[in-house]
């Protein structure tokens, strides 16, 4: 009789090999961008041969699509299994907003090259099933984040709290993409923009809360 342990062991090795490949793909994409994320370079980084990659994916685009969707799926899973609405409701809104925005500034700064490559890759594939699936994952993640803020609905003085939180978050994301992910001659803007990430975090938190009609008591105390 065939050994029933052989197939599961093979599948486990296959899953681990795929995990290493996708992790290497993400790292190379972040380091070298879309054009520099070649199959030979990814294979070398993963400790695999180009041929073994082509046996799994018919081209680089298919590999990058899988790796990027994996990032977005993990992000959505972490949001779903992380802080619950009950937990977020126990944190004062001003502090919760500051925590979220601080995390966003840190993440966008540390992952700026990867985020830039992901955006460029997606923009070149508008209308494809990949982009539609990626957008769906992003919207789901975004919606869950909005719902966490809406546990403080009674503190939001904007007439439409859901739209207010959504627009405020979009303004934060847009600013981070403009200043951190796709910066353009920021030295020319000296004196018109926050001097560092700490100042940027404070200004984004202040703007976010003001848009919601919430007094930023934390910032007020810091200013005093």
Image (spheres, helix red, strand yellow):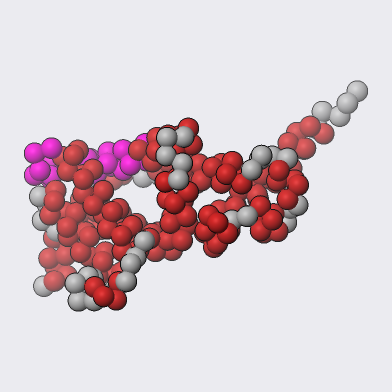
Left or right of 108: which side holds 191?
left
Using the rendered view, name the quadrant where residue 87 is placed.
top left
| Most foreground residue, 195 or 150 | 195
Indicate the quadrant containing the C terminus: top left, top right, bottom left or bottom right.
bottom left
Q: Residue at x 46, y 34 (%)?
A: 128
Residue in the foreground of this view, choosing between 13 and 99:
13
Q: Residue at x 14, y 67 (%)?
A: 221
Task: Confirm whether residue 72 shows in the render.
Answer: yes
Q: Is residue 154 magenta?
A: yes
The quarter holding residue 10 reads top right
Q: Does 152 sit above or below residue 128?
A: below
* Residue 135 is a magenta residue: no
Towards the viewer: 107 or 116: 116
> In the image, what residue occupies the spot 22% across and 65% down?
202
Residue 164 vertical placement versus 99 (above, below): above
Q: Is residue 58 left or right of residue 113?
A: right
Q: What main secondary structure does the magenta stretch of the protein show?
A: helix
| Residue 20 percent coordinates (x, y) | 65, 50
Horizontal and vertical percent for residue 183? 34, 65
Q: Residue at x 21, y 45 (%)?
A: 167
- Could you say where residue 100 lies in the image, as x and y percent from the top left? 30, 54
Quarter of image, res 112: bottom left
- Give left or right: position of 4 versus 48: right
| Figure quadrant of the N terminus | top right
State which region is magenta. 140-160
């Amino acid at each position: 009789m065939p050994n029933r342990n052989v197939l599961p062991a093979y599948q486990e090795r296959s899953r681990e090999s795929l995990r290493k490949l996708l992790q290497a793909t993400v790292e190379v994409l972040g380091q070298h961008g879309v054009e520099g994320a070649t199959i030979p370079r990814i294979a070398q980084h993963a400790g695999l041969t180009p041929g073994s990659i082509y046996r799994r994916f018919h081209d680089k685009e298919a590999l990058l699509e899988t790796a990027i969707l994996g990032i977005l799926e993990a992000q959505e899973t972490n949001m779903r299994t992380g802080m619950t609405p009950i937990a977020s409701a126990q944190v004062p809104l001003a502090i919760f907003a500051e925590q979220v925005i601080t995390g966003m500034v840190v993440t966008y700064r540390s992952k700026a090259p990867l985020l830039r490559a992901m955006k460029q890759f997606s923009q070149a594939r508008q209308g494809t099933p990949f982009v539609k699936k990626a957008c769906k994952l992003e919207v789901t993640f975004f919606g869950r984040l909005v719902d966490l803020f809406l546990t403080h609905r009674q503190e939001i003085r904007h007439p439409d709290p859901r739209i207010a939180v959504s627009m405020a978050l979009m303004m934060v994301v847009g600013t981070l993409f403009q200043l951190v992910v796709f910066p353009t001659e920021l030295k020319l803007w000296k004196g018109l923009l926050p001097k560092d990430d700490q100042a940027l975090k404070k200004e984004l938190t202040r703007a976010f809360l003001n848009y919601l009609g919430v007094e930023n008591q934390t910032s007020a105390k810091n200013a005093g």
